[in-house]
Each structure stands twice: as structure tokens, then as C-alpha cells.
Image (cartoon, helix red, strand yellow):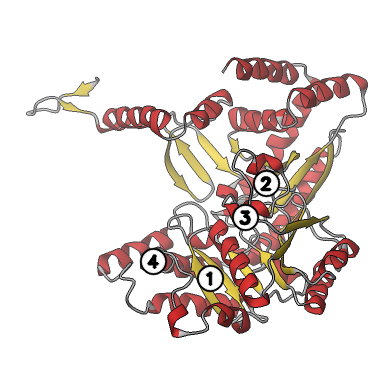
Amino acid sequence: MQSFTPAGSGTIPEPEIEETIQIARGTQEYERHVNPQWVRLLELLQMNASYTECRGEVLHTADGRQILDFLSGYCVYNAGHNHPRIIDALHRELDKAGPSMLQSHVNSTAGELAARLLKLAGGKVSKVYFSTSGSDGVETAIKFSRAHTGRTGLIAARDAFHGLTCGALALMDSGFWSSGFGPMIPGAEFVDFGDLAQLEAKLATHKHAALILEPVMGEAGIVLPPEGYLKGAQELCRKYGTVFVLDEVQTGLWRTGRFLAAHHYGVEPDMVVLAKALSGGLVPVGAVLMTDAIYDSVYDSLKRAIVHTSTYSESGLAMRAGLATLDVLESEQLGEHALREGEAFRRALRAALEPFEMVQEVRGIGYFSGIVFGPPKSLTLRLSFEAFMRVHPAMFGQMLVMRLYREHGILTQICGNNFLVLKAAPPLNASGSSLEAFVEAMRSTMEFVHKGRSFWADALRLASRAARI
């Protein structure tokens, strides 16, 4: 171990070296006791960095690199990493030494946060249940809609993503996420996002408690709804007595430029699921907003006052994180910023990527964007691309992710249910220079893909290494 000897003192280990040793030891224990496959995957992709400081959209690594975060923890960091105002609010809450998890009291901070959320959401919603995650919120929506309607059926969109608990998995038609876990809860059916005729045929059976949709589909590839679709879906739900639920876990909290993505489309859902960005990235917190009628269907008597709850659902620290996050997002007008700058960002991406035949589209809303790739027309590129797809459909997209990270210091990811769409979802307060850096990194990367053979050779070597693990 390296050390230094200040004048007049004995040998003292350098703090930086002690920290490096501790990180290395912790990494070994993680691989041994938590998730060895995740460690192996990060190593394979050359993305297993140790981060020492994260602020805004800039991540600092132990080896001196700066990484720009264009994934935002899957839309957790709307206010950026470690916003000082949120951290300060949490410090003050901890210093109070108050009844954070007493359970047998009324948490006034939860009441304050609920009122703020409902005012911002507007529309029909008037009650809030606080959850700890998006999946937890989706489970709540399933239970409450069933209690309210007396029905058990559920409708969701194909290629949706709603979470990884059993109820949420039942709302996802991709077998990848549910494979190996046995049967999910029964009663879920699927429709194509945007097809009102399919939806009405399902709803007309009068057996469905809820229609649960993402207003903008995230893991399906940043898919915006066709004009009039969400309004039409809402009208059909009213017609057939089905609860209209919007999963705004990724799209809420001004990610799309408005507090809810629903506000872009003029709809008033019966239930809204929020999570991710409400935490400020620091304390898990989610919220399910709903009408009085739905809420009263569950909490309809004194004996049912706690029939649906969770240990950490109204944690004092979580409620303070939610309030502080709203303060930051509102006072810094980050929604307006995302709406304005997000469109300029996509215009710049389209201009930079227009020459490249494998780029089909740049789409999105606010700071929620997707770059869509497709098979090239030229024979040489097409043969390489199709070979990749045969090895694994995610290989092309994952090679882009790896190269952006390794060569350009950009952290992002492909969509979980559409491997040919690359996400671009930076914190809402990301600087203009960071957006410009992303555009240039994409242009440079696509030029490398289209003009050089190294990209394709690297991918084949990656596939070979993966096969040996």
C-alpha cells in the first residue's frame, strides 16, 4: 500500500488508496453475494466503472473520466444527480429526528405532498396513495380498479413496460420479463397501442376493471400516441365502465415538458401512477393519484382503514424528498426548459444523422427521445446488420451503447422492448454543451458504423467473448 509521511508524524495511509481498496473489496463481495451476472455483463460491455461524484448530468469516475448521463436512471434524475436543494432538505428532515416511520400517526408532510401533486395533476383525481416504486403503484392500480368495478379483467398495450412484480408482469406481453416465474395473475389481455377498434372490442365485453397505458411508451421505443388515441381510449373507458389508468412512471414530473404527459393530450385519467423522478434520485417514493370514488371503494369502513398499505409508503424522509423535488422542478422551470430545448435537441440530432441510412427516425417529446435504427439498404452493411440480428437482436444497439460510453463518455441504453431504439433522456437541467456533445457523439459513432469495418469486427469479438462466459 502506498503511503506518505507528513513531517512530525508516523506513516498514514492515503485516504484515496483506502477508498480504492474498499471499493474493490465491495465489488468483489457484490459479485459474490448480490448479482454476479450483472458484474459480468458490465465487464463484457466495458462499462463497469466506479463513480466517485455525480452532479447534474456529469458523472465522475475513479479513473478520472467524466461521463454524461443521458439515461437519468431510466428517468429518475429529472432534477439531476444530487441536487443541492434536495440534499439540504433531506439533511434538515434528518436533523429534526422526527417520527419518520412511526406508523401510528398522521403524517402531515404526506398531506402536503398529496395536495401539491393533485393540484399539479388537475382533472378528476382527488386522493393519493403513496407507494415506494412504480411497480408498487401499478399493483395498487390493479387492486383498486378491481375493487371499484367488481371486475377482474385488465387491458394493456403490447410491448408495454409496467414493472417486474407479478401484477405488473401480467400487463406485459413480452415473455422475456416473465419467463421462469410461473403463471402471472390471470385476466390480462392486450391491444395494439393506437388501435381504438381493438380496444372497443375488448371493452365491450364488460369484464375489464382497468385499461392501463403509458401515455408515451418508453421501453417500446419512445412511441407517441396517434392523434386522438388517448382521448378516444378515455371515452371508451367511460362508456363501458372501465377505469382509465395512466402509467406516468417514466413520463411524469415534467419529463415530457408538462407535469403529466397526459396534459399534452387533453385527457383526465381516473388513476395516475407516478414514481421515479419524484424521489429526486435519493429516497424511493411513488404516488398513485385517483378519484374519490375509486379510493372509497377500498377504504370504505373503519375496519378497512389499513387494508392496503406498505411499511415505507409515507416515510417522512420520502415525503420530504418528494416536496423538495417538486420545489426544484417548479422553481427552475425545468418542464418549460425540457419542452423548448428537447425539440431543438431532436432537430439537431435529425440534421446530424440525416446522412446515415441506418437511422430511420428521431422521435420524442420534451427530454424523452428515441433514435430509431433499421436495416441498411446497401448490401455490405445489410449483410453485417443481419448477421448481428441472428446472433442476438440486441447486439447492434448494445454495441452502440458500448461505443458511446467507451469512446465518447456518454451513458445511455437501448429500449427494453425495442432493441433498435436508443434512448436519449438526460436530466431536465442538462446543459446545452452536454446536449451538443451527445449530438456530436452520435454523428461520430454513426459515421464509424457506416464507413468502417472495425465496428462490426468488434461486435463479433464481443459475441465470441459472451459465448465463452
Tell which circle, 2 or 3, labels the residue nearer the N-terminal end. Answer: 3
Residue type beneath disc 1: Ser
Mark-to-mark CA distance, 4 and 2: 32 Å
Locate the C terminus and report the quarter of the image it occupies. Answer: top right
Mark-to-mark CA distance, 4 and 3: 23 Å
Q: Nearer the viewer, mark 4 or mark 3?
A: 3
How many numbered marks are there? Answer: 4
Name the residue beneath numbered marker 3. Answer: 168
Q: Nearer the viewer, mark 1 or mark 3?
A: 3
Mark-to-mark CA distance, 1 and 4: 24 Å
| Residue 266, x across and y down, in percent | 77, 75
Mark-to-mark CA distance, 2 and 3: 25 Å
Outermost residue on the left side: it is: 8
Which residue corresponds to the image point at 67% horizontal and 39% vertical from the top-left? 176
The residue carrying pointer 1 sits among few (fewer than 14), some (14 to 19) or many (20 or more) residues within 10 Å by Cα, namely few
Name the residue beneath numbered marker 4. Answer: 315
Q: Secondary structure at mark 3?
A: helix
The residue carrying pointer 2 sits among few (fewer than 14), some (14 to 19) or many (20 or more) residues within 10 Å by Cα, namely many
* Rendering quarter of residue 13: top left
Name the residue beneath numbered marker 2. Answer: 424
Name the residue beneath numbered marker 1. Answer: 331
Residue type beneath disc 3: Ala
Q: Secondary structure at mark 1?
A: helix
Observer-nearest residue: 230 or 13? 230
Tell me if 231 is positioned left or right of 37 in this view.
Answer: right
Tell which circle, 1 or 2, labels the residue nearer the N-terminal end. Answer: 1
Q: Nearer the viewer, mark 1 or mark 4?
A: 4
Which residue corresponds to the image point at 86% horizontal and 22% vertical from the top-left? 381
